[in-house]
Amino acid sequence: SPFEKLFRYLDHNDDGTLDILELQEGLQDMRIIDFLEKGQKILTTGDINKDGKLDFEEFMQYLKDHEKKMKLAFKSLDKNNDGVIEASEIVQSLQTLGLTISEQQAELILQSIDTDGTMTVDWNEWRDYFLFNPVTDIEEIIRFWKHSTGIDIGDSLTIPDEFTEEEKKSGQWWRQLLAGGIAGAVSRTSTAPLDRLKVMMQVHGSKSGKMNIYNGFRQMVKEGGIRSLWRGNGTNVLKIAPETAVKFWSYEQYKKLLTVEGQKIGIFDRFISGSLAGATAQTIIYPMEVIKTRLAVGKTGQYYGIFDCAKKILKHEGVGAFYKGYIPNLLGIVPYAGIDLAVYELLKSYWLDNYAKDSVNPGVIVLLGCGIVSSTCGQLASYPLALVKTRMQAQAMIEGTKQMNMVGLFRRIISKEGIPGLYRGITPNFMKVLPAVGISYVVYENMKQTLRVTQK
């Protein structure tokens, strides 16, 4: 195969592996510009077992992965599907990315790729040129498939977004975060009654046993009027900003610790950095979580707002009360983030393998669908921990119950109510996912236009 020939050609000392010098020399012989950096990049991307060399398996894997992505990029550039890329198609494609270049500049780009002088680039020329110029098109795929951008389902345990270097330099990143924050605030407020019902069912589930969706709403309205359906929402909205800020900042720091300079972050490292960032953010804003739960479960007149609630908790129960349920909360991050990310990546690669005919852009519906499915799976896995967390946060308010720790509560719920007891309130929780995602997406898109976030 051509890959085998290439491997043998690069492997000067015939030891069946390529080290950095062989890669760089080979690229220099092939007149590849920036051969030193490119050699390093190919080695770090392709070296799966991290032994500092590429064996034939790794080399093949690298080329196959790369070729698949190259094919997608080629197809999305070849607008008229005639198998070659012309200057006008390059102009057109760059325009959709927000870059305007002249036909002459496009011709210069083509000349650098075009080996047979036809002033068009066919698949073979494109592949040969880009095989050793990694990461041009891969950025595209990452950009479209950013996970969770502008989607807020109220439980922000998800892995934060990746931002490209240009986005960081141009300040697009904070505009995107701001747009996402506003979208989150609107969607949480819109679905707050369902969220409060979920908390009520989690806390009072065992006591009444009869609390269903209709009864739950009736009891809440009877007890405190329509306005009481939004109890605890203020805190839920207020915590978006500090949580997002801490999570984003700490994610960047953990990523730096885990990856070699200039290397693309892998899925596993992203999961670890994301989980640690989530844990860091949760630790800092956790008292707000406790206040949100207390307000949501509270009766009319029990608390007069966030500060009153904080003051009363401090006075009657001490500082420790602000971290009740912290351990199940922390434990819940890992299954949630892990399953969410794994399912999302699975759906993404399935789509790219089977449906990416003309473009790597899957379109809004597919992206939202993947986001909803993956976060729903994550929620299913971590829900019992979330339920126990909420119980622990609210325990002190329920008369006649003994304060219990996490293990004790799990035991009690299972012995009294069985496994279904661990999933109380999951129905209103899932009912709010679709409207929350829909609302936050629409608001996010509108905010991006208002804040002039450049469209990709």
Image: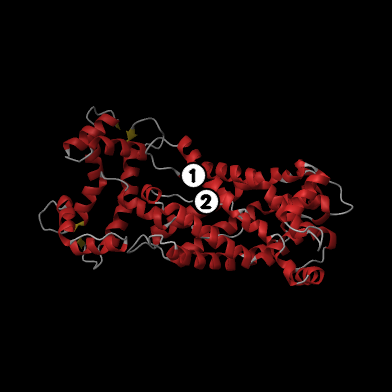
Quickly name the residue at label 2: 341
Quickly name the residue at label 1: 270
Tell me, yes or no, whether the two marked residues, 1 and 2, touch with CB atoms within 8 Å. Answer: yes
232 sits left or right of 215 in the view: left
- Specify the label residue 254 is tagged with: none
Residue 439: image location, x then y, percent: 55, 68
Residue 286: image location, x then y, percent: 67, 47
Q: Amino acid at mark 2?
A: Leu
Instruction: Label 2: state its secondary structure.
Output: helix
Image quadrant where one finds the C terminus: bottom left
Comparing labels 1 and 2, the label whose residue is closer to the camera: 1
Rendered view: 150 above or below 36: below
Image quadrant where one finds the N terminus: top left
241 sits left or right of 217 in the view: left
Tell me if residue 86 can be seen. Answer: no
At label 1, counting other C-alpha atoms closer than 10 Å, the crowd grade (few under 14, some 14-19, many 20 or more) is many
Tell me if residue 67 can be seen. Answer: yes
Residue 35 or residue 221, whichever sits in front = 221
Report the residue at 42% width, 50% height from top.
163
